[in-house]
Amino acid sequence: MAIEIRIPTILRSYTGGAKVVEGAGDTLGDLLTDLDSRHAGLRGRLVTEAGALHRFVNVYVNDEDVRFLGALDAKLSDGDSVTILPAVAGGAFGFAAAAAISSHSAAAAAISSHSAAAAAISSHSAATAVAAR
Amino acid sequence: MHVLSIDRSIIDAIVAHARRDHPDEACGVVAGAVGSDTPTRHIPMDNVARSMTFYEFDSMEHLRVWREMDDRDEEPVVIYHSHTATEAYPSRTDVSFAGEPGAHYLLVSTREPDSEEIRSFRIVDGVVTEEPVRIVEAGVDPHAVQSYMFGQSPATVDYECSGR
């Protein structure tokens, strides 16, 4: 069963420069394990030590964001196309998000969903704004 | 040394976007032909964080725009965002998230109401390198070029959206 995976520039060091690779698996989690057997280290850039998808990596199955398909449990079928894009994000507010990224596993534990992260970020920034006055 | 060469009309459009979204951060992309290092197509993006201190592309818009670039043999030559109360220099957050090693990361600061600070950086493996921004006046004379470095903004220009 072949599934096509589109690899972003920043992760092509794991695929020998290849932009598209093939893999197999019934779920996204299985697929990433399969890929890691040939492209060692790739899975670790996408999945936290706690076993969740990194908050700031976007993975799509065909045209859907996997966050809405069960994340690593998203079901795959033959012929599906999986696209990986590192989130484009940033901003003036420094420490919370930077800390979240620099310690991936802690971030994954603390930030388990999109909305929780956004809430955490906005409440932190509100606190900073108040503190700055 | 890298230089970002960019058309005046694109810079004007980016600044107008940043002014429009101020005090929230604005973000977007300028696409260009693969390997050309020339930004030609300005794509303002939604900031789903709608925050004064954080920006994030909408994941579905991100996919759509990246696919479109792929189809047109383009790449993100410039990824820009605004800082609305601080200088146009990458924060630790910006450095942590920078996921496009080939892109020029352009920052616009809108903290001053009537002038903008525009600076450009490469961010590769956590290392920030500033580069000059060369604004090309294509509309006037393609060979007439002005260079700006290290945060020197263009002399005050009344951008069309600055009064709103």
Image: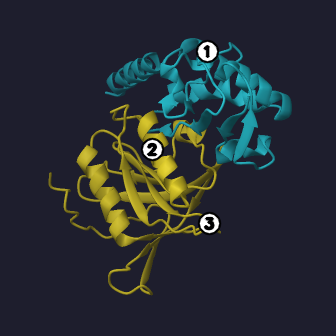
Chain letter behind tag 1: A
Of mark 2 and mark 3, the one earlier in the sequence is 3
- The crowd level at tag 1 (other Cα within 10 Å; few <14, some 14-19, many 20+) is some
Chain letter behind tag 3: B
Chain the render paints cyan: A
Q: Identify the residue under disc 2.
A: B64
Q: CA distance from mark 1 to mark 3?
A: 37 Å
Residue A71 figure quarter: top right
Whether residue B96 sits left or right of residue A126 in the image: it is right
The correct choice, above or below, for B94 with respect to B28 in the image is above
Chain letter behind tag 2: B
Q: Identify the residue under disc 1.
A: A73
At 51% from the left edge and 46% from the top edge, which residue is drawn? Answer: B90
Q: Secondary structure at mark 1?
A: helix
Residue A92 figure quarter: top left
- The crowd level at tag 3 (other Cα within 10 Å; few <14, some 14-19, many 20+) is few
Q: Secondary structure at mark 2?
A: helix
